[in-house]
């Protein structure tokens, strides 16, 4: 009879030990996942910061390109006003003579 009690106690102790070991393994796995998540978040934040910096630079370049285009258009308008072969009407429409296009490309 005492053998049965001893076997039951041993089974309970083994089951408790297995439960304790599995809980520790699960806790260790969760901590590893948390660490990996922290690393992924850090990498994502760095990537996001780089992307925002690139977007800002692109915006600046686009603004500069628009300013350059406006300056070029203004120079073209002034050239059209000075060019004797170009007629500019009151509405701003330009009628370039046949030699004007050749002069612009050379």
Image (cartoon, rainbow, N blue to C red):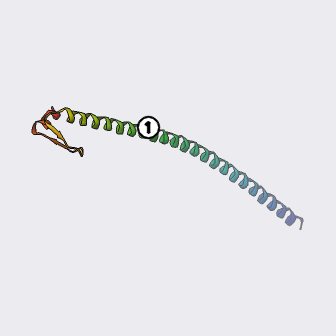
Left or right: residue 51 versus residue 104 is right
Give coordinates of residue 32: x percent, y percent.
Answer: 64, 47
Left or right: residue 57 versus residue 24 is left
Give coordinates of residue 16: x percent, y percent.
Answer: 79, 58
Q: Is 35 rendered above or below residue 22?
A: above
Within 10 Å of the Cα at label 1, are there few (<14), some (14-19), or many (20+) other Cα atoms?
Answer: few
Pick whichever, 9 or 47, lies toward us. 47
Q: Which residue is rendered at x = 64% and y = 48% of the image?
A: 34
Give coordinates of residue 103: x percent, y percent.
Answer: 14, 33
Pick whichever, 40 or 10, lies toward us. 40
Q: Which residue is rendered at x = 84% and y = 61% of the image?
A: 9
Residue 104, quarter of picture: top left
Left or right: residue 29 versus residue 58 is right
Q: Which residue is rendered at x = 61% and y = 45% of the image?
A: 38
Q: Which residue is mark 1?
A: 57
Residue 3, quarter of picture: bottom right
Residue 81, quarter of picture: top left
The quarter of the picture where the N terminus appears is bottom right
Q: Residue furthest left?
A: 98
Instruction: Report helix, strand or loop for mark 1.
Output: helix
Q: Residue furthest right?
A: 2
Pick whichever, 63 or 20, lies toward us. 63
């Amino acid at each position: 009879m005492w053998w049965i009690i001893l076997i039951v106690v041993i089974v309970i102790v083994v089951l408790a030990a297995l439960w304790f070991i599995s809980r520790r393994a699960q806790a260790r796995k969760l901590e590893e996942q948390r660490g990996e998540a922290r690393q992924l978040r850090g990498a994502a934040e760095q990537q996001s910061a780089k992307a925002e910096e690139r977007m800002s630079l692109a915006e600046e370049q686009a603004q500069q390109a628009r300013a350059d285009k406006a300056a070029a258009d203004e120079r073209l308008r002034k050239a059209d006003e000075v060019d004797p072969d170009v007629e500019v009407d009151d509405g701003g429409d330009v009628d370039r003579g046949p030699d004007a296009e050749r002069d612009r490309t050379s």
